Amino acid sequence: MRRRRSSVRGAFAAACGAALGATLVLGTSATPALAQGGLYTEGLLVVLVPVGARTVGVGQTMVTAESGSESLWGNPAGVARQSRREAALHYSKSFVADGTVLGVVYPAGRAGVLGFGAQLYDYGTQELTDNVGNPVGQLLTREVVALFTYAATVGPRMRAGVTYKLMQRRNDCTGPCITTINYAVTTSGLDAGFQWQSARADSLTLGFAIRQMGLKLQVNDEAQSDPLPTRLHLGIGGRVPRVTKALPGAELRWAAELVNRSSLDQPAVRLGGEMGLQKQLYLRAGYASGIGDATGPAIGFGFVRGALTIDFARVFGGFSSDAGQPPTFLTLRLTW
């Protein structure tokens, strides 16, 4: 993100506007309204930013997916059947922010599956100047999320999971900072979800998740605290057996998902598909409706070589695309 000049007196308003505005742009199904600084009704919209190139490539249809560490940030039930350990790095870049996410999945046998994750979104730096324009320091605006997931199977067809998230918005500065500029505020929340898979040849799967249930984010006082962006996800997915019969070694999977706020006043639709060839090459396409920088059509591909998986995806919609820098997502994954 390009550096922008500002006075110390105006830096707090500029930083809040940059962080909240950029997060709104990145998040999906977010609505602008009044809040902490008179801008938005929800806080920490960064948790709505999709994580993982595979998820983005299939239009963010994550509620029925079993996509390893990416499921930690979508539907935690998606890791319940994972039998191999995984460590993954997910990176995203757009016009407004760079995102880095680390994810680890650890199968614990009959005890279930554990997951750990850390997420950092960096909105760049702002140059602080004095009244005559001389540089006096820098302001760094970032949002950080850490999570812990537990998931397990419930009978032969059901999978369930829950995730605890610790979320923080922070401004850090160098030079002669004032307290209203330099701050860190923290809150916590829960995700919960389940998946049910039929015994049919098409592996039809139903999924449900509720994300970001938790305490409000308070920067100034209780009266001005922001609720977390709670979202409900309901989806269906499966595979097309005829493709495998016609083309041995190939597999075509599809998914459809409905996403809404807890008030049920702003539904968004997601559609996606993935074609796998010999479990080594994957081609993906999807579409996500709603407001946000990761909405619109998306494409992606994946390549598996032994324990290493590389996934890439790009979105062709939203503010960043209009600015000439479509959001790009890259995932590096190791399993053993």
Image (cartoon, rainbow, N blue to C red):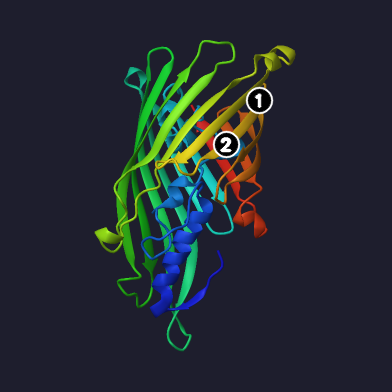
- Going by the numbered disc 1, the residue's amino acid type is Gly
Q: Is residue 178 left or right of residue 208?
A: left
- Residue 234 vertical placement versus 19 (above, below): above
User: Which one is closest to the eye, mark 1 or mark 2?
Assistant: 2
Looking at this rendering, what residue extends furthest in the front direction? Answer: 265
Mark 2 residue crowding within 10 angstroms, few (<14) / some (14–19) / many (20+): many
Q: Is residue 332 left or right of residue 173?
A: right
Q: CA distance from mark 1 to mark 2?
A: 20 Å
In the image, 262 versus 77, the foreground residue is: 262
Residue that carries the numbered disc 2 in the rendered image: 270
Q: Quadrant of residue 252?
A: top right
Residue 56 position in % (x across, y down): 58, 40
- Element carrying mark 1: strand
Residue 92 position in % (x across, y down): 55, 49
- Element carrying mark 2: strand
Residue that carries the numbered disc 1 in the rendered image: 276
- Residue 284 vertical placement versus 92 (above, below): above
Q: Residue shown at 50%/51% (left/top)?
A: 99
Mark 1 residue crowding within 10 angstroms, few (<14) / some (14–19) / many (20+): some
- Residue 285 vertical placement versus 91 (above, below): above
Q: Quadrant of residue 306?
A: top right
